[in-house]
Image (cartoon, rainbow, N blue to C red):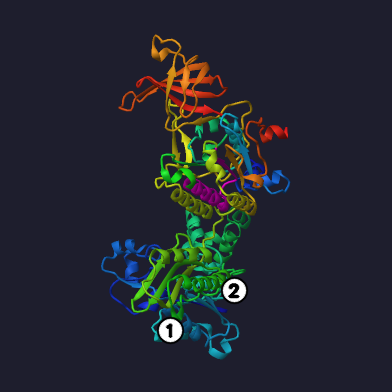
């Protein structure tokens, strides 16, 4: 690996690569992709996450498939997979959502990862709607203050409101960020 | 013409604590770190092969009957002040080279106090009268004087001391380890190169040495020749570990009001450590309780640091876990410091610190996700088995240098959303299949969990796999990719041993 490649890789590993690619603009932010399972959200989310040097995949419903992620270019060694356990009452319902919210806050504040995907696609929509807006504001504020972490929220219905920078309504055709840029 | 007098008090911690001529092995042990370490020994213990730096357990194996005493920094400081006061009578240009060396510039003092050799003799006599054993070295340069004191050479009278120093063993350079370069480490390297004497080190070509060892190598070469350019960088002596004490009137109810005082003390200490290039290797907090005795806590971080917030967090945790049983009337805080480790973890930061932070984050995540074994919080690693979904969870340790965009494949590749555990399905076939394992699910009505029944339009497969047939957990299954009439795609599994259908996951 040449010195230039090492430098670029090192900058990426520290989470500075994304902001460099954006010519100095902040790389942080909350995105929300809403839709029903089957809308290829998972595939696009995997491709989006694979662009990060260190990735966290919050998986409350335990739906992540490592083999698919590897096929889509994700380096599994760079991935922190947080698996929920739907069999446990503490990780279900609103108490479970509260725990996951705290987990996401902790991840954002640590700055240990560059991209976070929170996969709530299979979580009941009624419970997702009951999350107070202040929780999303708190996440967004943490992302902005850290400045090095991006987060993608996969939900069955739009819940983050104005806190999310990019949204996709359910049922609409989804284009990945890469495809839109092209 | 000897101009410099070097004074060395060997095993100063032992002389400060015990001294005298004990007939049995005596050790001075430091208990501030994670494990007790020998810091000084008497000649009897040295004869048994015990040296400073050994752990107490190792030393005890060599000298089971040895007497161990705890290090007394206050006594060491008193001894140093006594030595400084003694040497002050001979020259006003006296540099302390902590922890146990002093250097005197005797230029111009001969007319007042007599020849340099006579002064050295008087220094030794005065020290002996106080019960201090020391060695003196006289030489025209500072480096040569320090080396001569360490090796016990007679006074060097030549203007160029290189010839007198040449026969000394290369380990003598370790005497200058306190002069800004880790000479002890370089001594080992020189020995591996086959250099046995200072003369051999002095004869090394400077350019080649600089290319290999940098400035440290050049310093060692100069010292081996008795040249002392850049030698004297006397660091301030480490501050004595005096306790920071405070009495509370009225007594503090609970431990929370104690935190501001602790924070203030730690911040002040951290600023002093920063100025003196020290780091905290140990911390002890003692609280005097109103009528309930004392409360003690000792903390030794695995890596010395000077971050007051981390230290405060440790004390806060200790107080929260074992809160004092009565109001606090007084507090005392001891700190043990040492020189921080000089290591650059990498081009972009300290990897050791980052790893520590990562471990702390993972521990907090495991608590949040109710996962004490770490089986649901880590990095997945695919196993090289016939089962396509076989993986294990390993601790998350990302690469320092990752290239994420190196090989992102193009094209449409569906992602599977796995179902764990796989729910059982019911398939209603339009006609009874002749052999269940050979039946394609195409055309069957599939009863998916929590969904309306859907008819399978197309099916691809089967992909047959089996394994572990030599154990009780043998498995054999057919996998099918199916497309439903509603447009969704899933992966189904037919367990050939149970003869049942399961949903492996849905494609998204």
Q: Is residue B333 visible?
A: yes
Asked whether A99 falls inside the magenta stretch, the response is yes
Going by the image, does A116 lie left or right of B441? right
Residue B407 position within the rendered picture, expressed as x and y whole percent measured from the top left: 61, 33
Chain of the residue where label 1 is placed in the rendered structure? B
Question: Hey, which residue is sitting farthest bottom in the picture?
Answer: B112
Asked whether B386 falls inside the magenta stretch, the response is no
User: Which numbered tag is attached to residue B178?
Assistant: none
Range shown magenta: A95-120
Q: Does B386 sit above or below residue B405?
A: above
Which residue is more in the foreground, B299 or B45?
Answer: B299
Going by the image, does B142 lie left or right of B429? right
Looking at the picture, do discs 2 and 1 lie on one chain? yes
User: Which numbered tag is attached to residue B127?
Assistant: 1
User: Count of labels shown?
Assistant: 2
The majority secondary structure of the magenta stretch comes to: helix
Which of the image's four quarters has the N terminus of chain B? bottom right
Camera-nearest label, 2 or 1: 1
Q: Residues within 10 Å of mark 1 (few under 14, many from 20)?
A: some
Which residue is identified by label 2? Answer: B159
Chain of the residue where label 2 is placed in the rendered structure? B
Which residue is more in the foreground, B429 or B490?
Answer: B429
User: Residue at the location (50% across, 63% down)?
Assistant: B310
Residue A95 position within the rendered picture, expressed as x and y whole percent measured from the top left: 47, 48
Q: Is residue A56 visible?
A: no
Which residue is more in the foreground, B340 or B65?
Answer: B340
């Amino acid at each position: 690996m040449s010195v230039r490649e090492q430098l670029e890789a090192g900058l990426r590993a520290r989470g500075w690569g994304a902001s460099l690619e954006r010519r100095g603009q902040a790389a942080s932010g909350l995105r929300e992709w809403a839709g029903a399972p089957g809308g290829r959200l998972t595939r696009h989310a995997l491709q989006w996450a694979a662009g990060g040097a260190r990735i966290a995949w919050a998986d409350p419903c335990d739906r992540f498939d490592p083999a698919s992620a590897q096929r889509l270019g994700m380096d599994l060694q760079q991935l922190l997979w947080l698996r929920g356990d739907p069999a446990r009452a503490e990780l279900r319902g609103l108490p479970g959502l509260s725990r996951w919210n705290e987990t996401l806050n902790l991840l954002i504040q640590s700055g240990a990862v560059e991209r976070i995907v929170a996969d709530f696609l299979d979580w009941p929509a009624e419970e997702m709607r009951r999350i107070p807006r202040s929780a999303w504001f708190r996440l967004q504020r943490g992302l902005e203050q850290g400045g090095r972490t991006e987060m993608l929220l996969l939900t069955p219905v739009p819940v983050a409101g104005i806190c999310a920078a990019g949204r996709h309504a359910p049922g609409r055709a989804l284009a990945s960020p890469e495809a839109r840029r092209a | 013409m000897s101009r410099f007098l070097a004074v060395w008090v060997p095993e100063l911690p032992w002389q400060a604590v015990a001294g005298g001529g004990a007939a049995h092995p005596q050790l001075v042990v430091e208990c501030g770190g994670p494990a007790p370490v020998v810091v000084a020994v008497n000649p009897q213990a040295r004869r048994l092969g015990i040296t400073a730096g050994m752990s107490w357990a190792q030393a005890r194996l060599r000298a089971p009957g040895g007497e161990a005493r705890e290090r007394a920094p206050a006594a060491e400081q008193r001894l140093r002040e006594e030595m400084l006061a003694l040497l002050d009578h001979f020259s006003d240009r006296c540099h302390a080279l902590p922890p146990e060396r002093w250097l005197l510039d005797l230029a111009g003092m001969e007319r007042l106090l007599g020849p340099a050799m006579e002064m050295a003799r008087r220094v030794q006599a005065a020290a002996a009268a106080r019960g201090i054993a020391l060695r003196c070295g006289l030489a025209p340069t500072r480096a040569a004087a320090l080396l001569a004191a360490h090796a016990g050479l007679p006074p060097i009278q030549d203007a160029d001391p290189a010839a007198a120093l040449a026969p000394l063993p290369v380990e003598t350079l370790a005497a200058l380890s306190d002069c800004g370069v880790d000479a002890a480490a370089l001594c080992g390297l020189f020995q591996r190169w086959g250099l046995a004497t200072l003369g051999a080190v002095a004869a090394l070509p400077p350019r080649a040495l600089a290319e290999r060892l940098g400035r440290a190598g050049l310093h060692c070469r100069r010292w081996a020749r008795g040249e002392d350019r850049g030698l004297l960088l006397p660091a301030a002596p480490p501050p004595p570990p005096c306790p920071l004490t405070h009495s509370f009137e009225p007594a503090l109810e609970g431990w929370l009001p104690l935190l501001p005082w602790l924070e203030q003390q730690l911040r002040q200490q951290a600023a002093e450590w920063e100025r003196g290039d020290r780091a905290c290797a140990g911390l002890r907090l003692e609280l005097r309780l109103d009528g309930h005795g004392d409360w003690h806590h000792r903390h030794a971080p695995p890596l010395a640091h000077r971050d007051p917030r981390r230290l405060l967090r440790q004390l806060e945790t200790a107080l929260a876990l074992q809160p004092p049983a009565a109001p606090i009337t007084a507090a005392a805080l001891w700190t043990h410091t040492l020189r921080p480790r000089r290591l650059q973890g990498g081009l972009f930061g300290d990897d050791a610190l980052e790893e520590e932070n990562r471990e702390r984050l993972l521990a907090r995540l495991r608590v949040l996700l109710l996962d004490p074994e770490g089986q649901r919080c880590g990095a997945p690693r695919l196993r090289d088995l016939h089962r396509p979904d076989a993986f294990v969870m390993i601790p998350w340790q990302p690469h320092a240098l990752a290239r994420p965009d190196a090989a992102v494949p193009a094209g449409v590749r569906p992602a599977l959303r796995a179902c764990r555990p796989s729910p059982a399905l019911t398939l209603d076939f339009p006609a009874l299949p002749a052999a269940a394992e050979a039946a394609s699910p195409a055309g069957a009505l599939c009863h998916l969990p929590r969904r309306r029944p859907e008819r399978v339009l197309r099916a691809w497969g089967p992909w047959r796999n089996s394994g572990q047939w030599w154990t009780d957990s043998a498995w054999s299954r057919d996998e099918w990719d199916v497309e439903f009439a509603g447009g969704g795609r899933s992966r189904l599994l037919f367990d050939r041993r149970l003869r049942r259908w399961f949903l492996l996951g849905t494609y998204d």
